[in-house]
Image: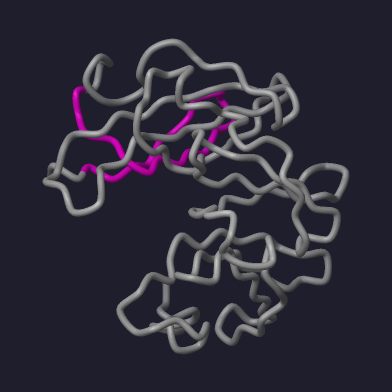
Amino acid sequence: ATLIAEQILYPSLLGVTAGLPVADVSGVLLADGKLRAYVFAQNKGIEIWDSSDGISFTRAGNAFGGDSNGYGMPRVIKLTDGRYRMYNLSSGGISCSISSDGLNFTLENVACIGRTAFGISGNMTAPGIIKLASGGYRAYFSTVPILGSASVAQKSYSATSPDGLTWTPDSGVRIGTGSSIDQSAEHPTAINHSDGSVTMFYFDNIA
């Protein structure tokens, strides 16, 4: 890999006060070859920026029109029918929203993956999602520490869905206390392989 730019989306570009978050970017490739980036910007919500080269970005819009919904940590997938679905952390767990143009999103469910189904009292990360060979999707997500608190081991979980909207919890813990891998596992994402196996990547905040 060759570094092409140390900064592509940053506070001054997005009109955010220095030191406040511009974070959690999710990208999709558009039909015209452009890259569309969805990024959380403090006090602005989910900003949308497009680029033809992955270096210089131009503002395309805001997913929800501002920060009033409090949705953070965007994860976007492009559906087979050309629409876009966004997953965000929300007060109830993980929310699902839909868009026909990838710019204007409509909330489908504020808790399509609800935290109570997993016995989680705090926030959850937006998910890393893979398509299953048998059809449908599997989402991987985790608990997150309380801001400003000491590092505490986190757990990763998963759920399956036939359509990306209606989710059924998988039993148990994927990685973390209570699983076969007793390691802190935060902000997971995953890729699937042709042999049916899955590789998870995650942050071990204890290590």
Q: Is residue 47 above or below residue 99?
A: below
Q: Quadrant of the N terminus?
A: bottom left
Q: Name the residue at 49% across, 81% down.
A: 8
Residue 43's x, y, as percent? 48, 71
Q: Is residue 192 above or below residue 150?
A: above
| Colour approach in the figure | one colour
Identity of the residue furthest to the front in this view: 68
State yes or no: residue 72 in magenta.
no
User: Does 204 sit left or right of 49 as displayed?
Assistant: left
Q: Name the residue at 79% across, 52% down.
A: 99
In the rendered image, which quarter is residue 50 located in?
A: bottom right
In the rendered image, which quarter is residue 200 located in?
A: top left
Residue 150's x, y, as percent? 11, 46
Q: In terms of depth relative to the viewer, which is nearer, 137 or 23?
A: 23
Q: Name the residue at 65% across, 48% down.
A: 86
Q: In terms of depth relative to the viewer, which is nearer, 2 or 52?
A: 52
Q: Name the residue at 60% across, 44% down.
A: 87
Q: Quadrant of the C terminus?
A: top left
State yes or no: residue 202 in magenta.
yes
Q: Which residues are magenta?
A: 182-204
Residue 116's x, y, as percent? 45, 21
Identity of the residue furthest to the top in this view: 171
User: Does 175 sit left or right of 17 as displayed?
Assistant: left
Residue 81's x, y, as percent? 88, 44
User: Does 145 sit left or right of 170 as displayed?
Assistant: left
Q: Is residue 147 above or below residue 40?
A: above
Q: Is residue 174 above or below residue 202?
A: above
Q: How many marks?
A: 0
